[in-house]
Amino acid sequence: MKDLLAVLLSVFVAMPGLGDTKKQEQTPRMVHFLHAPHPVYPKNRHLFGSGLYRIYFNPRTGWATSVEILKSTRSSTLDQAAVDGFMKWQCEPGTLTQVTIPLAFSSN
């Protein structure tokens, strides 16, 4: 059985110092992450769902500083697994302030 099926459909980013954040979030572009592990799917659970998360980064270090749940999976266990995983992400310093990630959990 696979532990996790994570589907990253698209990445929308906001660059530091470029003005209107709402406009920037609608501009897809390639992003280089130095560290981006998959969230750990809870063992012995038959949970599934999809959610939408916004990760905020420290522009100096590139490390995630917080995660906002924009759309819940409707499972606090899955949402917490996503937040815990995303808090371990690091992007190239000076490139991102935030990124929005869709994520789907499925047990196979």
Image (tube, rainbow, N blue to C red):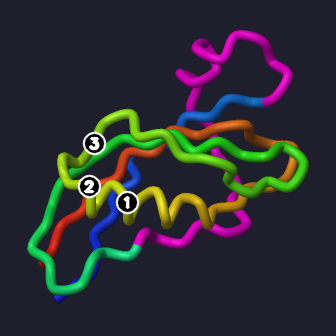
Disc number at residue 72? 3
| Residue 21 horizontal side relative to residue 80, left or right | right
Q: Is residue 78 above or below residue 68?
A: below
Disc number at residue 80? 1
Residue lying at 30% horizontally and 45% vertically, measured from the top left: 51
Q: Dot 1 lies on which element?
A: helix
Disc number at residue 76? 2
Q: Is residue 23 above or below residue 13?
A: above
Query: Mark 2–mark 1 contact, CB under 8 Å?
Result: yes
Q: Is 17 included in the stretch rendered in magenta?
A: yes
Quarter of the image where one finds residue 88: bottom right
Disc 3 packing (10 Å; few <14; some 14–19; many ≥20): some
Tell me how many marks there are: 3
Residue type indicated by callout 3? Ser
Quarter of the image where one finds residue 49: bottom left
Q: Is 26 included in the stretch rendered in magenta?
A: yes
Q: Name, please, the residue furthest toward the left.
A: 46
Residue type indicated by callout 2? Ser
Query: Mark 3–mark 1 contact, CB under 8 Å?
Result: no
| Residue 15 horizontal side relative to residue 103, left or right | right
Residue type indicated by callout 1? Gln
